[in-house]
Image (cartoon, coloured by chain):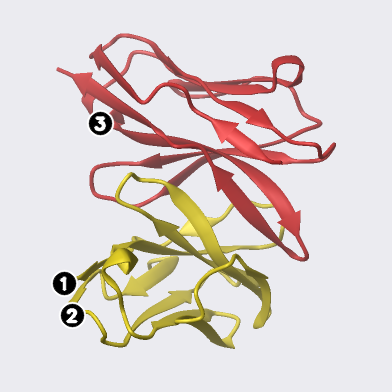
Chain colours: A red, B yellow
Amino acid sequence: AQKVTQAQTEISVVEKEDVTLDCVYETRDTTYYLFWYKQPPSGELVFLIRRNSFDEQNEISGRYSWNFQKSTSSFNFTITASQVVDSAVYFCALSEARGATNKLIFGTGTLLAVQP
Amino acid sequence: DTAVSQTPKYLVTQMGNDKSIKCEQNLGHDTMYWYKQDSKKFLKIMFSYNNKELIINETVPNRFSPKSPDKAHLNLHINSLELGDSAVYFCASSQDENTEAFFGQGTRLTVV
């Protein structure tokens, strides 16, 4: 069965620290997609990144970077020099294709608190 | 211009009532979804539609009935509301099964 595990329930850091959010997934599919979403205190869900199973290159976007390793079924997310505005719940998700739609299977989320 | 918009943002209602949540997307996407986020922040899919056709119905009680009048709209009607229906409901859309979903701002439903 498809599953996403985010073992870190809450992380608290001080501004400017680097922080890594872990994500481990399970799937029997050979083709799949992984995502990260951010949910700030205001409640909306903000898309951050999509990665397909054939592309293991790490990705960097400003202070954000993602490390995808198929060998360990992990898709970890690092924030460099964290800021208070990074405080949010972060969700990792795995996509299961169904017809012409997909079903996002979310992890339980990691609450990141960045203290000033 | 909001890409995926839901109304209302907050909904407080009594047990037994019927209510609807509306969703519209202006992204030109073919696929729309409803997700439910419970009090522990757990997100789970309820329905998906592609070009007005129901694709996923994830064992949701039949008191929940989605309706897609056209591919830009997916409304959620809930009959005989129960206390356990209290949650945040998110509408989303995506271009196809391989692309990311964009979410609305959520509707916080409270049943009292």
Badge 3: residue crowd in 10 Å (few <14, some 14–19, many ≥20):
few
Q: Name the residue under label 1.
A: B112
Callout 2 environment at 10 Å: few (<14), some (14 to 19), or many (20+)? few
Asked whether the beta carbons under mark 1 and mark 2 sit within 8 Å of each other, the answer is yes
Please indicate whether residue B17 sits to the left or right of residue B45 in the image: left
Q: Which residue in the structure is indicated by mark 3?
A: A85
Question: Which chain does the numbered disc 3 sit on?
Answer: A
A104 to the left or right of A79? right
x and y, in percent, of residue B76 in the image: 44, 79
Q: Report the Cα–Cα distance between label 1 and label 3.
A: 34 Å
SS class, disc 1 = loop
Instruction: Tell me the kind of residue under disc 2.
Output: Gln
**The residue under label 1 is which amino acid type?**
Val
| Chain letter of disc 2 in the image | B
Asked if badges 2 and 3 are on one and the same chain, I answer no
Circle 2 — which element?
loop
Q: Name the residue under label 2.
A: B14
Q: Quadrant of the N terminus of chain B?
A: bottom left
Q: Which residue is drawn at 31% across and 79% down?
A: B81
Give the mark toward the camera: 1 or 3: 1
Foreground of the two, B65 or B21: B65
Q: Is residue A50 visible?
A: no
Contact between labelled residues 3 and 2, with CB atoms less than 8 Å apart: no
Q: Residue at x 30, y 29 (%)?
A: A86
Q: Is residue B15 visible to the viewer in this orientation of the structure?
A: yes
Indicate the quadrant containing the C terminus of chain B: top left, top right, bottom left or bottom right.
Answer: bottom left
Q: How many labels does the image show?
A: 3
Rendering coords of residue A4 (x, y %): 58, 34
